[in-house]
Image (cartoon, helix red, strand yellow):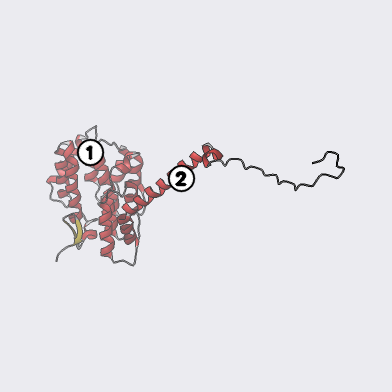
Amino acid sequence: MNLNDPSPPPNFPKLQIITVDPPRLTQREKYGGLFYLGIVGLIVVVSLVGWFSWNAWMLRDVWSNVYILHDRARSEDERIHAASALSRDNQVNAQQRWDIALRKPLPALARYIMAESWSTEILKEDPALFAKIVANSEGWPPWLRLLGVRLMAVAACEGVIFPPDVLNAIEARPEADFKPWVDFIRAVSPESDVDAAARLRTQATLNSPGAGLAKELVEALEDSPPGRTHRLATATLWLRMNDPAVAPIWNGWTERDGQIVRSRP
């Protein structure tokens, strides 16, 4: 190229400016601690869904029996058998047993079976309140109140104390004979009411309809504390066939090999 040449220099094409992209950040670099928090949250959600699904699967028999029990289109036999299964299922808690037994639309025997399965867990938080409910609740059939008093007797064997005035109120109710149970509760209390024990023993010797129950309760009273609950179970069986408030509910039914079935003619 001649430096003295006056002609203009040649036009070269403009070069395109290329911008180099910055290096891409990883998800961890973009979100920092939130990335790990999201992973942990996802694991928790998946775990909870799995836990819920597993528990729902394990409770499938409970849900099935609850549905059958409350389905009025089902036969009485089916509903009573469902109640029997629920009463023996450890997955049915104390509050659920309580609620089912109080449902008036259910067959009487189904309610009775559930009430008979009540555990002392339902009353130990507030024994006085439970006793007042048993003594004063309106609309309770005599057999339901009787099972409430029976549960109080079981709890008394475990050391639970009930207010004397409430026991007096239960004893004074006219719809059933609660006196043997109330005397038993008094006799096994820490104060060991000797007069109540004497009344119970006297009634056991009489030729009266309640003498059989009194005999069962005296045997429980004279047993050692660990054996009293077992004796009360025998007294509960006596109620089914002999108590005037209970026997009509069990008419045509019996328990065989742990199952509630129609009694044979």
Q: Amino acid at mark 1?
A: Cys
Question: In the depicted view, which residue is nearer to us: 195 or 162?
Answer: 162
Question: In the depicted view, which residue is nearer to us: 245 or 148?
Answer: 148
Image quadrant holding the N terminus, namely top right
> Could you tell me how many numbered marks the image carries?
2
Q: Residue at x 27, y 63 (%)?
A: 78
Q: Residue at x 34, y 65 (%)?
A: 72
**In the image, 200: left or right of 23?**
left
Q: Which residue position is annotated with label 2?
A: 42
Q: Residue at x 83, y 38 (%)?
A: 3
- Viewer-nearest of discs 1 and 2: 2
Q: Amino acid at mark 2?
A: Leu
Compared with 238, 152 (above or below) is above
Q: Estimate the x, y position of residue 141 in percent, counting from the top left.
A: 31, 55
Q: Estimate the x, y position of residue 178 in percent, counting from the top left.
A: 25, 47
> Pointer 1 and pointer 2: residues touching (CB < 8 Å)?
no
Picture quadrant where residue 6 is located: top right
Q: Is residue 175 visible in this depiction of the protein?
A: no
Compared with 162, 76 (above or below) is below
Q: Residue furthest right?
A: 6
| Mark 2 neighbour class, 10 Å CA radius: few under 14, some 14 to 19, many 20 or more | few
Q: Estimate the x, y position of residue 217 in percent, counting from the top left.
A: 17, 44
Q: CA distance from mark 1 to mark 2?
A: 50 Å
Q: Which mark is residue 157?
A: 1
Q: Is residue 5 visible in this depiction of the protein?
A: yes
Q: Estimate the x, y position of residue 129 in percent, counting from the top left.
A: 36, 41
Q: Residue furthest top?
A: 191
> What secondary structure is marked by label 2?
helix
